[in-house]
Amino acid sequence: MLPMSPADSAVVRVSNLKKALQYYRILYGKERRSDAHGAEFAFRNGSRLLLEPVSYVYGQGEVRIARFGIRVQPFDRAAAAQGIARLGGKVLQDDGKVLRLQDADGIELELVSS
């Protein structure tokens, strides 16, 4: 068995990079880099979240991440939920410990309070 460490990176394929950046900026702040080929968010623990634009026809999309979760420090849950809703996302669950969100591409993100 391999010893566990923080994840190095996760790649999320999105249908509209500009809209996805607006969504993920609410959660993570300004990206480290962004261009027509994608964007990168970097975290203090060394992990990275990479966004890649991809064109696809509904139901014929490439395999992609369906859901991922990250541990976070306390944050304004209501403000995050409102910002995500303004961008076409949804709040799927908020039990006080986990805030599960869904972006416009259907990718779910769980913010797990530490």
Image (cartoon, rainbow, N blue to C red):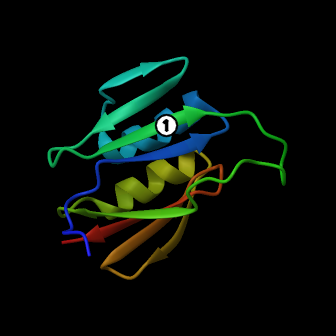
Q: Residue at x 35, y 22 (%)?
A: 33
Asked which quadrant contains residue 57, the reply is top right
Q: Residue at x 37, y 32 (%)?
A: 40
Q: Percent x, y for residue 11?
A: 47, 44
Towards the viewer: 19 or 82: 19
Asked which quadrant contains residue 66, the reply is bottom right
Say what amino acid the circle numbered 1 marks: Leu
Q: Is residue 3 left or right of residue 59?
A: left
Q: Percent x, y for residue 86?
A: 55, 46
Q: Quadrant of the C terminus?
A: bottom left
Towards the viewer: 73 or 51: 51
Q: Residue at x 49, y 37 (%)?
A: 51
Q: Residue at x 26, y 46 (%)?
A: 47
**Residue holding disc 1:** 51
Furthest residue in direction bottom, as rendered: 95
Furthest residue in direction top, as rendered: 35
Does residue 66 lie above or below 88 as drawn?
below
Q: Residues within 10 Å of mark 1 (few under 14, many from 20)?
A: many
Does residue 107 lie above or below 86 as drawn?
below
Q: Quadrant of the N terminus?
A: bottom left
Towards the viewer: 85 or 2: 2
Q: Secondary structure at mark 1?
A: strand
